[in-house]
Image (cartoon, rainbow, N blue to C red):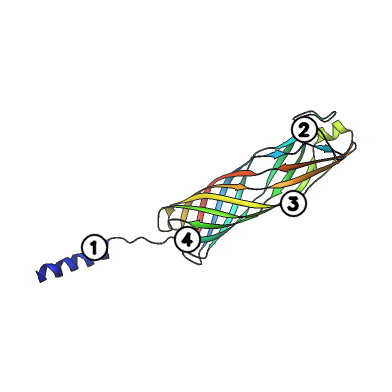
Amino acid sequence: MRFRHNLFNLLLVSICTFVPQAQVWANSGDWIVRLRGIGIVPDDSSSVVSLNGAGLAGTGVSVDSQPTPELDITYMFHRHWGIEVIAGTANHDVSLEGNIGPVAAGTKLFDTWVLPPTVTLQYHFLPENKFRPYVGLGVNFSTFLAEDASGALEAALGGPVNVSMSNSWGWAAQAGMDIQLQDNWFLNFDVKYIDINSTAKLRTPAGLLAVNVDIDPWVLGAGVGYRF
């Protein structure tokens, strides 16, 4: 009986020794860099366009979708928890809905570069798995650069148009998955929703046009990453 008990213990030790143990892929202090191709798809809405403070019924604006590259860096301060900083920029067209005098519906009003640095706190569910899903919640700051009125708008209004857009603070949420490839390399798939709201002001020969725009894009991404 004692012999069988000792034999059982020996077998148990042997199994524990030779069966591969789960390894935690990311540890506290690790850095993770991802490069993605993303599609920015605005879930946009707007107020009516106003002219010199008076709302113009039946008007509004829309924001187009755009592809662009995106770089993000994550610092893991725990095997389950990380902080991600997201950097990227894209140029978007803003077009008119409804008619404003000689400016017809569908006319491109202007384009602008959107710079939306975003920071999220992430939770990684399965750090020891080949398939590692995560979720994140954070804050976004968006600024708008090089706003440029379209030639069609300036031709319709008979003169130059100056465009400006206000900065935006909002929340951001994400869900994604890293899929192990080899060594420190992995594939990444990621979806974000970002709360971006701005007021556009267009100083025109006819007066001041203004509109509040909720851009609120879905950001759909796929790419590769590397752990340091």
What is the three-letter code of the residue carrying label 1? Ile
What is the three-letter code of the residue carrying label 3? Asn
Q: Earlier in the sequence, mark 4 or mark 2?
A: 2
Tell me the distance, in whole angstroms, between the alpha carbons under discs 1 and 4: 28 Å
**Residue at which label 3 appears:** 167
Give x and y (percent) for residue 190.
53, 48
Residue at the (23%, 67%) spot, across then down: 13
Local SS, label 4:
loop
Front disc: 1 or 4: 4
Location of residue 22 by image quarter: bottom left
Tell me the distance, in whole angstroms, between the alpha carbons under discs 4 and 2: 48 Å
**Residue at which label 4 appears:** 80
Residue at the (48%, 56%) spot, across then down: 124
The numbered disc on residue 15 is 1
Of residue 208 and residue 94, the one placed in the foreground of this image is 208
| Location of residue 115 with respect to 151 vertically, above or below | below
Tell me the distance, in whole angstroms, between the alpha carbons under discs 2 and 1: 72 Å
Q: Earlier in the sequence, mark 1 or mark 4?
A: 1
**Residue at which label 2 appears:** 59
Q: Earlier in the sequence, mark 2 or mark 1?
A: 1
